Amino acid sequence: MIKVENVSKDYELTDGTKVTALKNVSFEVKEGEILGIMGKSGSGKTTLLRALRGVEHIDEGSIEVGDVKVKAGDSQFYYNNLKKETAIHLQRSFGIWPDTVRENVLRKLYARRYFDEGDTNFEVAESEFGEEADELLELVSLTHKKDHYASVLSGGEKQRLIMARQLAKQPTALLLDEPATMACPKTKQEILDAVKKINKELNITIIIVSHLPDIQKYLADRVILLEDGEIVDEGSPKEICDKFMEDMDDIVDIKNVSTDEDLIDVKDVYKRFYLLTGGEVLQMEDINFKVQDKNILSIIGPSGAGKTVLLRMLGGLDDPDKGEVLYKVEDRWADIDIPGYDRMKIRSKLGFMHQEFALTHYATVLSQLSTRLGYKKQDIVNEAKERAERLGLSEELLDSFYLLTDLPESEAKERLRQVGLDGEILNDLFPRFPETATKEAVADIFESLDLDMDILHRKSYELSGGQKVRVMLSLILVSRPKFLLLDEPFGDLDPVTLRDVTNALKTISKDYGITIVMVSHNTDFIKELSNRALFMDDGKIIDDSEDIDEIVDNFIDFCHADYLKGD
């Protein structure tokens, strides 16, 4: 059915360094089988899947899917034939039209015959493919949402709609690349059940790339293990998952205990907002809690509960409609929603790592660290104040610019563009730190994060997935923040690398006395790192507990996440 023989693939970095992504990879997949592929970040999993899809040309070997075979050196014509035999579902991919759910599927069915998805004649599509569209929606359990516009679906529903659209192509094999990585347990369960149903009812061959043992054990018939681009083992899901986890470091013997001193005080916060993912209005009200010095607090709950909105209010990136978010800085309380120098002092001690974190693609690691230290270095508020006075900027306007330094780069640039300003104005107000001083400042952070100082001169796109996450974490930690806000930034990490990051976070927070508030769906990560958790649903806090195991287990039951209850 699928046959891969001696496939190799190399990449060349800008400095001429050759990186081997795949080396002599060989395996076969039977018709109707679900094959799992596991490996740490950077092991070659996604490159292999892209080669199977026909979008990555191989340097050596051959790939056979159904009746189509491509060999190293073949032209694009043969790779295009491979694309016709496969369908791929990528991580974080939402390639859908702003139509109804059913029309999205009809478009793909129409394109299968008439080769033009963008100019679909829906009258023809309905008459020829209406019944098939309904069958596909039933297969992914979206019949009840067929007349809803795709834009108002939840994350899990969008994922299942994408699967229906891929199945409309009648592929020989379905390729899944971490399709549910960033989803909450409830959403992830829905996606996994859809995959099982597709396999059972269509007998379609599926290859799923996932570094999450729970997913492989729930779905796969057999798993192969990749390491540095080579297959090092294959066997049952349990055998390979156990082998994969053998290299995991032990949990560091550090118990992070908070003090009794309150540093954050959230008082009577009320926020009403529109959920793009659900087409509904969510009302947050009566949000009250305090965070103590050296707390490591997790905010948990299903998608759409209001977790990220709450964290953004804690970071001063969104304002509550009512209520206060207070920080204790320099022995007095200040409101992060009130513009001015007090808010800048809070922000100078605050690190925010977003869900959609992104390194600057073509910038070196060193230049990004220098920029970050320019934003967060000691005395930054006083220095920026002097520059603002020379430029004739008010206190409130300076604070507005400083707020942008904690936003994702794309959001910050868009806000500046809307008022006709160039992003370079931030560098004028907050100049970069000297490179020599930056190297000195980051040395111990790199050591804690197991990063080699040699990568300082690499560009972001030359880093592996695991390196990118650790570099981003170093960007946040290099300024020694007093407060660290994390919005699910580690959802793409394999558990072995995640344990490294968890241990580093525990060590660094202990050594530097950092107070952490984080949003996460990863139940193991929450249990290992947190000493307290808030459970949210429908905009409300329904539980606040220091018994982490109990509150996380309650969350799993709440989500009916059967895949987390296996062996």
Image: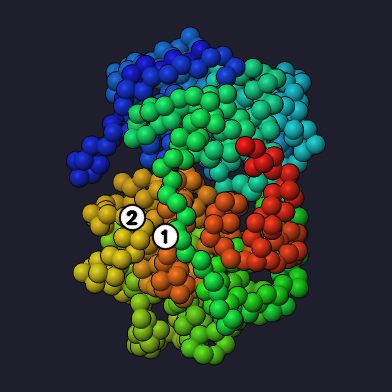
Sequence-earlier tag: 1 or 2: 2
Q: Is residue 431 left or right of residue 359?
A: left
Residue 288, located in which quarter of the rendered image?
bottom right
Q: Are marks 1 and 2 in contact (CB under 8 Å)?
A: yes
* Image vertical order of residue 341 relative to residue 89, above or below: below
Question: Which residue type does callout 2 highlight?
Answer: Asp
Residue under circle 2? 450
> What whole-number distance in Å separates the C-alpha atoms at marks 1 and 2?
9 Å
Residue under circle 1? 504
**Disc 2 secondary structure class:** loop
Question: For mark 1, does the 10 Å Cα neighbourhood hold few (<14), some (14 to 19), or many (20 or more) residues?
Answer: many
The residue depicted at 45 percent of the width and 51 percent of the height is 250
Question: For mark 2, does the 10 Å Cα neighbourhood hold few (<14), some (14 to 19), or many (20 or more) residues?
Answer: some
Q: Is residue 26 left or right of residue 199?
A: left
Q: Is residue 427 left or right of residue 284?
A: left
User: Which color scheme is applied?
Assistant: rainbow
**Disc 1 secondary structure class:** helix
* Image vertical order of residue 506 relative to residue 49, above or below: below
Residue 69, located in which quarter of the rendered image?
top left
The residue depicted at 59 percent of the width and 22 percent of the height is 169
